[in-house]
Every structure is written in structure tokens, then in C-alpha cells.
Amino acid sequence: MAAAAATDDYDAATALAEFHATRGGVLGLIDSGAIAAAAAIPPLFLAPNSRLCSPPIAPSTFVIPTVDLSLPRPSLVAAVRAAAQSCGFFYVTNHGILESVVSSAVSAVRAFHELPLAVRSSFYSPTPVDGVLYYTMPNDPPRRAADPEALPVLPWRDTLIVSVSPGAGAGGGIERLPSECRDALKEYRDAVSELGKETLSGLLSEAMGVGAGRMESAVAPETALMACHYYLPCPEPARVVGSLNHTDAWLFAVLAQDEVGGLMARVAAVVPTGAGAGDEEDQGEQQWVEVPKVAGALLVNVGDVLKVLSNDGFRSVLHEVRIKSREEARASVAVFFNPGDSAAVVGPLPELVKAGETARYRSFTVAEFMAARKELGHGGAWVERFRACEQEKQPLI
Ligand SMILES: O=C(O)CCC(=O)C(=O)O
Ligand SMILES: [Fe+2]
């Protein structure tokens, strides 16, 4: 494996092919002893200096909202609405999933990624095989093409993606997983699937200002994928990227993480302009804030398709993962809820387009959406393609 600082004769394509041929991910690289020192981090993973100058993390004045799901319905709906409108990320407590189920799932993610090389490498593949993919996924190629100087080729992260859609056959990809992680991930998938379909979908619908069954009738939310991430410790954390900034594309996601930290969200500090409830609020400057683990809570993330359904009433927040630790690996697990019907047409719900106004987006099919993401990358820019009005197109950062 080619190592050390990039030089003009560094052959990135060969280095990438060699890295994937090891089938061991970033952990394999570390275990091989190749990167005992920062100077030995392969250039494929190195963010250029320009990226390191990104603004420092603001001292956290912004707190990610927490919504207590045991609140009486009207207060609950109001709290979800406020969180989805202002931030797009919010924690839920009293969600009904035992803490032991959540922590076992996070431990199962860790257990998979720490399996002996010979076991985990049999799953290593850039495309899913029977609903399972284990890979160090190269950073978004369309965005890299747009700015090759700004992005490293590979993130400092190994990922296991498991299909959990009901259409993926009994158990989806989970049945293929090794016994060290299978049962805990199954239990978690079942619990989060119920939370998403029985509770969050109805709540988010009502929070948009439509009936509880409206999201279901429009797009039939379904669990689609479970992304089990493992962010490795790094001798020089600021030189590598855990995940590039992106918005989640679909309806919503539920995320659990351990205590290591590094998840960041780009939020606008909200500046209240009055003292009473319901007073106008100004959006302050955008800043990156850390989204730490909150004990007993799960993080809910509004996706781009839900933002479209809400006619921009909700935000889908830009987020990324930075590597924080030189010693500890970070594990997280995200369950994504997508439109269950692949023939669904997505657009702003007509009842959310105020009289005399036009919808903010034109309607699009799931196939159009997939094509736009493939072309424009996972940065969140794809959604702007469907803006009804050219002047309203939003810059990402
Ligand atoms: O690992 C995390 O905390 C975030 C993962 C994420 O953003 C994603 O899977 O889309
Ligand atoms: Fe994400």
C-alpha cells in the first residue's frame, strides 16, 4: 500500500485499488501497522489544508432540541413542529425502546466491524450482495469532481449497510449477518421500525399541519436501510474526514451513537425578537455545532423528501462526522425511512401550499430523485433541481 505524503507521482487509482483489495477497511489498515504515525496516513484519506481551515466549532450555545414523546398530544405536536422547523434534527425521549436494546445495537455495530479480518472481509463489496454491503465507501464522486482539491478520496470510516425493507425478503440482509451482531440488530430494527411507522410518521405529519395519516397516504413510509458506521481513531484526526457534509435524502432517519462524539450539524442560531410564546424569531448565522449523545434519547433527522412534502416547512439539516479521537473508534447506527412505494410521486402536499402561493417544488418520481442524486451527489444539492422557482434555489453552505 502506497503511504506517506502525496507527491506528483502518487498513483491514487492504484492506491485505491490496493486498499480495497485488502478487504479489511480502515481498521485493516490500522491493524496492519501501516499508520502508526500521522505521516503514514495514505494520501487517499488526507483532506487538503484548505479543508482544515474550515471554521472552528462554535462554543455550543445551540442545543439540539429534545422532544419528550410522553407529552400530551397537542404539546407534543407543537414541540415536534418547532424542532423540525428550526433545526431538522431533534432528540426523542420516552420513545419506548429499552436502553439495553439501543446499546446492544451500537455494540453489535462495533462487534461486526471488529470481527477478525477473515470473517468480515467475506462481506466486503462496493455493491450490496443479498442485502448486505460492507465497504469503506469512497467520498461522493460527483462532489469530488466539482472540487477535487477539497475532498479526500476516502473517509476514515468503515460502513456496513443492511437492507431492512420488507420487500427485501424475510429479514432482508440481516439474516446473512454473523451471529456476533445479528440478533441485536434484528431486535433494534424491529423496535425502530415500529417507532418510525407507528409514532414518528404520524407525529411528523401532524407537525406539518396535516392529519396524522397524511404521510402514510402520500408516501407510505417504510424502513429501507440500516447504516452501521465505524469511525476509526486517527493519529491526526483533523487531517481526515469521518463523513462529508450532507443532508439525509429521504423521509426521516433515526440515529443512535456511542459517547465518542464527532457528529456535527450546521444550524442557524435562533435569535428571539420578543419575549412571549409565538413571537417572531430571526435566524442567526449558520454554525457547526456538535450533536453529542444524549443518554436514553434517539436522534430523529428530517430528510430532503420530507422537507419537500412540507413545502419547506421543515428543514433537512446539513451534517457531517469529524474524527475526534486518537484512541477510540466511534460506532453509530442510522435507520432510514423511505417512501415505501417506488412508483410514488413526491411533491409538496397540496394542502400546505397557501392560497395564492405556488408550491416550492415541482413533483418528481423516486426514479427522477435517484437520478438527480447520482448526478449531483449526496451533498443535498439534488433537491434544488426540483425547485419550482429558479430564484429560490438555496446554496448549501
Ligand atoms: O454516524 C453518524 O452519526 C451519522 C451518519 C449519517 O449521517 C448517515 O448515515 O447518513
Ligand atoms: Fe446522514
Image (tube, rainbow, N blue to C red):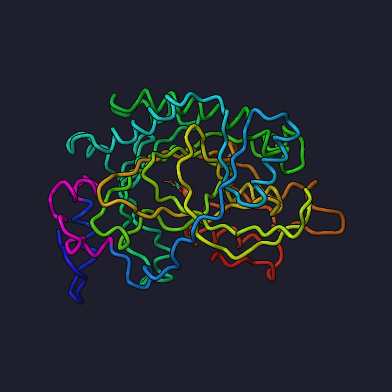
Furthest-bottom residue in this view: 8
Q: Across the whole image, how many numbered discs are drawn on residues?
A: 0
Image-quadrant location for residue 160 = top left
Q: Position of residue 212 (x, y in %)?
A: 73, 33
Nearer to the camera, 275 or 282: 275
Residue at 69% across / 57% down in the picture? Answer: 361
Magenta stretch secondary structure, dominant: helix
Nearer to the camera, 54 or 369: 54
**Image quadrant containing the C terminus:** bottom right
On whether residue 22 falls in the magenta region, the answer is yes
The residue stretch that appears in magenta = 21-45
**Image quadrant containing the N terminus:** bottom left
On whether residue 109 falls in the magenta region, the answer is no
Residue 375's place in the image compared with 363, above or below, is below
Furthest-left residue in this view: 33
Residue 296's place in the image compared with 267, above or below, is above
Image-quadrant location for residue 172 = top left
Q: Position of residue 271 (x, y in %)?
A: 67, 60
Furthest-right residue in this view: 356
Residue at 24% across / 37% down in the picture? Answer: 114
Q: Position of residue 32 (x, y in %)?
A: 13, 48
